[in-house]
Amino acid sequence: MRRGYLDRAGTILLSDYFVLYLSLAYVAVLIPFLPVLSTPANLSNVLSNMWPLLVVAIGQTFVLTIAGIDLSQGSVAGLTSILIAILIATAAPEQVLGHTPVWGWLLSEAGGPLAGVSFGTWIGVGIVLAIAACIGFANGLAVAVLRMPAFMVTLVGLIALSAFAIWLTQSNNIRNLPDDFIALGKGTLVSLFFGEQYQAQLPRREVHAFVTWPMIVALSVAVAAHILLSHTVFGRRMMAIGLNREAAEISGVPVRRIIVMVFVISALCAAIGGLLYTGRLETGRPTLGGGNFLLDVIGATIIGGTSLFGGKAKILWTVWGVLFFVLLGNTLNLMNLSAFHIDMVKGGVILAAAFLDVSRQRLRRSRT
Amino acid sequence: MSDTVLELASITKEWFGVPAVSDLTLTVPRGNVVGIIGENGAGKSTLMNVIGGVTPPTRGTMRLKGEPYAPGAPRDATRSGIAFIHQELNLFTNLSITDNIFITEYPRRFGMVDHRAAMTQTQALLDRLDIRHAPETMVEDLAPGERQLVEIAKALHRDADVIIFDEPTTSLTPRETARLFDVIERLREDGRSILYISHILSDVRRLCDKVAVLRDGRLVDEGAIGDFDIARMIRAMIGRELSSLFPDRSNLPSGQVMVQVDGISQPGVVADISFQIAAGEVLGLFGLMGAGRSELARILFGLDPAEKGSLSIDGREVRGAAMQRIRDGIAFVTENRRSEGLLMDAPISENISLATIGHIGRGPVGLLDREAEQALAEQARSDLSIRASDLTRQPVRALSGGNQQKVVIAKWLAASPKLFIIDEPTRGVDVGAKYEIYALVDRLAAEGNAVLFISSELEELIGMCDRIMVMNRGEITATFDPRETEPRFEREALLAAAFGEIVT
Amino acid sequence: MIRPFRTMTASVALALGGAFAMPVQAATICFAFQDLETEFWVAGHLAITTTLTEQGHTVLERNANEDANRQFEQVNDCIAQGVDGIILIPQDGESATTIVANAQDNDVPVAVFNRPPSDLSRGIVVVADNATIAEQAVDYIVDQALANAGSDETLNAIIVVGDLGDPNAVGRRTGFYAAINKHAERFNVIEVASNWDAATALSNLEAAVTANPQVDLLFTSSDFLFPTIRSVFEPRGLWRQRGEEGHVWMAGLDGDATACQLIKDGYVDATGVQDLFFEADAALQAILQAIEDGETDPNQVIEDPGFALTADNIAEREMDMWGCVLLAEGFLD
């Protein structure tokens, strides 16, 4: 009897949906104390926060699968953010940006070179994605061919690219992005109107975005990534490299080519995430993706269940990991903790989740 | 002087109700070397863990030097005078020999660590074991055999009465093995008792006073070494008669040269290697460790570069990286199954399909055809009789050594190669499974493939090969062909060639 | 980049307490700020929250840890929680514009201070006028310098400029020239670039002083450079107290604790101060007013004229300057 009970608990622990259950349980525990958690306004926020992070975390999942790590994702996002803004801004103040190295030949009072060009935004997106792919290619070459540790290569990328992005605009931000680009970051396809709401002193319209362009972009990326990772020869070869690079090589897996492609994918995901954040904030920022961003990306991916040591990853896990991280940030905001306590509580919750994950691994091992 | 040191009475150890060792009674006389043999999973490790205090027995008692002995932890076993020399040594490679010996209890003087005393005592121990290294030498600078001697020095330092060796010779060169045997000889004369676990039955024959054979957790046979020939050991271990260690070869090599190797050289690794293998031929490659055998294999497979030379199969030159060479018909069963041959944590089916995964991809993005993959694995299971419960879920880690090796071979069979390079295929594989692997090698040849069989076990080469090539320091020093030199292979001549001595 | 202004103070509480009457109804206010790294901020944010709490309002505090994206998400979360108004100290002007627009689109009034949004047309924005503040401080030392010099003497004036990519630095330089140009014929101006970096300032200032050993007046675009200036001036005998022969008339801007100490010690003569009490007060007052009026998107620019804390007025205005408040609390001990 008891054994059956434990068995069922074990099955939940080992399920692909474990972190989703964990997130739901977390929300269920908190709802009595934080009713606002389940309001449409809050759900809309949670979703909006989730999509860009998810895209970046998917890229990281790929790199972790081959037992690598990509620390340069944050700076790629920052560089992307500033490059797209330079290319497609519709106006730029000389007083602020006049002394930047891009002033005059790329950026002027009339904005970037693609301002006013038809399909300019999409040409710009194409260009920055190509640049990101080149960065990923360089990272991949250094790791695969020169056999440098991914940690070092991408750490250098992290430092150098973010310095380059800051230098490009001398730490200034660029606004005046065209509407079609901003729509990419926050454009709504389906909103729901919940009537007037009187909880605040001022009546307000409760119109909340649910289906947005970032959602479409992120879910498309996720579906494509899932197929690539779990249902193709390419994904199988990635797993093999992550499990045992030597054995994979001896078994005829084109190890170098795959490592390079994985870093390209990671950089592309970082760039797409950067574009979404840029559109949402309506500002090209060289420092986008700085600070704790990378920890959120890697943390969410690991909490989802992807192994830091390679060979064990699923996109679905990453989706739940990102959901958990975003919910955590969201609930901590809602708890009205003092600013000091927030990070302490956050650390505690992550620790607990990590502990659960470790026991999960142990259980999985003991079952095979 | 045959008073009993260690006495096991009706020891039973169960894991979740399943006995790993059942009702085992055994005595270890003082000054005796007792060989413990049995197939993998026969209960040897569990028994040793019980003796070493790693896990308590479910039932039964032990007596050590006449006293009841019930260790609660490995620490207790050490204190009571039982030393355990594991396959994977327990040394801190970044510390000196002295530090390793004294790590738990440094001699003290006025409350300070007395380095000088420690050094002197270490030196004395090293002298006893003929280790010509200074006590302050870092363990990482020692060869594997020497490291093992340091473990033994540790045991001597603690004045252990019973020393357990678990497969001590797997990573040793023949010379180091000989030296280890000398040391064990001396320990015996010293009045210490040795439990010697090994798969190498000739070593057991040579070294032990007494043999105990385990099968399915039971002691199925025991007796003085004089009464135990190898045939009896094998019979007891596998529980049936094994007519021969090696299958009869079912074919003769065809006259047709399939593999042609010409003048392969890489400075410092191999020099001017040329040979041919006919279709259906098993060519043995013998040599001591470091003779360049595995290095040659890696070059042939395109993993390491060669400065000069060529390899062709059926008249077509083979070049490029491993990926390319697999397509051109080479398969490589590596020496290290775990680190180079298998994805230990991946399921069996994924390991079997790995080399041919490209063929399983469908459509422009290469979608996996899981049914095809499963069919491939299923076929391999029936073809090679791989013993596994669930091909798509069970990780290869959970398989026995012999079955793991079959998975490696299945992987290559799927790629339908022409040349099989097989490096030490029976290492860490128990007797019964060894025979199956030999039978597979025979089958590969019978199907018209060329096989390059690399091994440091002379017996298996003599048993399986049509010709044997011997390497020494990167060069081929001799090739033996029994069709020309009667009667069969000469062991002495092969060994002499391996040591680089002139064959007369 | 150095941000010379990070503001708010312990005695904001005192200032606000008397500044305006209680609003009709208790409100929930989201106070989103960009950073809480220094002791100064710790005290400052405590002051604002206690003030609001004491007046019966509920405060939701949100620390963005210098991450604009996080601040955006935090303000959205505040909105979801149904706050009545938002007070924002933004990470930068550009993200502030988006956040303000977003709040107003959700019918929540918002006020910004300390660092203005790049677009001043939406929201309640309290702007410090760097030019006016700088001009006030420089006016004081120009007058003092001229009064202590011969009537036909030409004086050497140094301005340490900040990073001119920063509108703050531009405004401060403008203010400096506005004051100097009232007596343009009496001054020979030497510009020293700092890019808001102490090491750059050090080497450029050394070069300037070596070329012009006679210095009569100096204005630094930020107080944080005073220790650097001292290390250049002291070995050359230029670091003298007021009244001593060879005293250089010096003014800064920001009003940090070091500047307060140096004015008291007589080495520095004035510093221009963003009047943060005024700013916080104005932002609060405007937001509460908007709530009371039922206005969801109040747009208003409030100018903070700032003031110059000088050797002459330090006695009465000391406690209006955050640097001196910190000093009084033992910040430099």
Image (cartoon, coloured by chain):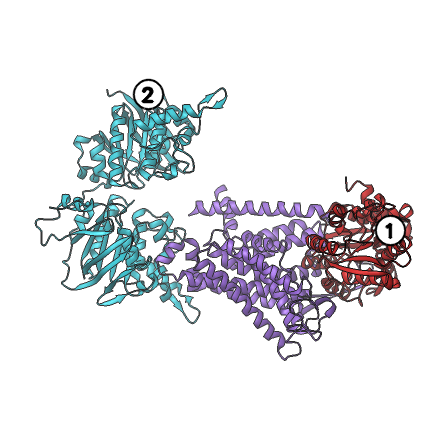
Q: Position of residue A295 (x, y in %)?
A: 59, 53
Q: Nearer the viewer, mark 1 or mark 2?
A: 1
Chain A, hue in figure: purple
Q: Position of residue A281 (x, y in %)?
A: 68, 64
The residues tagged by marks 1 and 2 sit, at their Cα atoms, a distance apart of 92 Å
What's the residue type where badge 2 is placed?
Lys
Residue C63, compared with residue A82, is above or below; it is above
The residue closer to the viewer here, A354 or B11, is: A354
Check the image and name the residue furthest to the left: B486
**Label for residue C309?**
1
Chain letter for the red colouring in the rendering: C
**Label for residue A17?**
none
What's the residue type where badge 1 is placed?
Leu
| Parent chain of label 1 | C
Give the structural element (helix, strand or loop) at label 2. loop
Give the structural element (helix, strand or loop) at label 1. strand
Q: Position of residue B502 (x, y in %)?
A: 15, 46
Residue B418, compared with residue A87, is above or below; it is above
Bin the neighbour count of mark 2 within 10 Å (Cα to Cα): few under 14, some 14-19, many 20 and up. Answer: some
Disc 2 designates what residue?
B65
Q: In the rendered view, does C292 fall on the left or right side of B405?
A: right
| Parent chain of label 2 | B
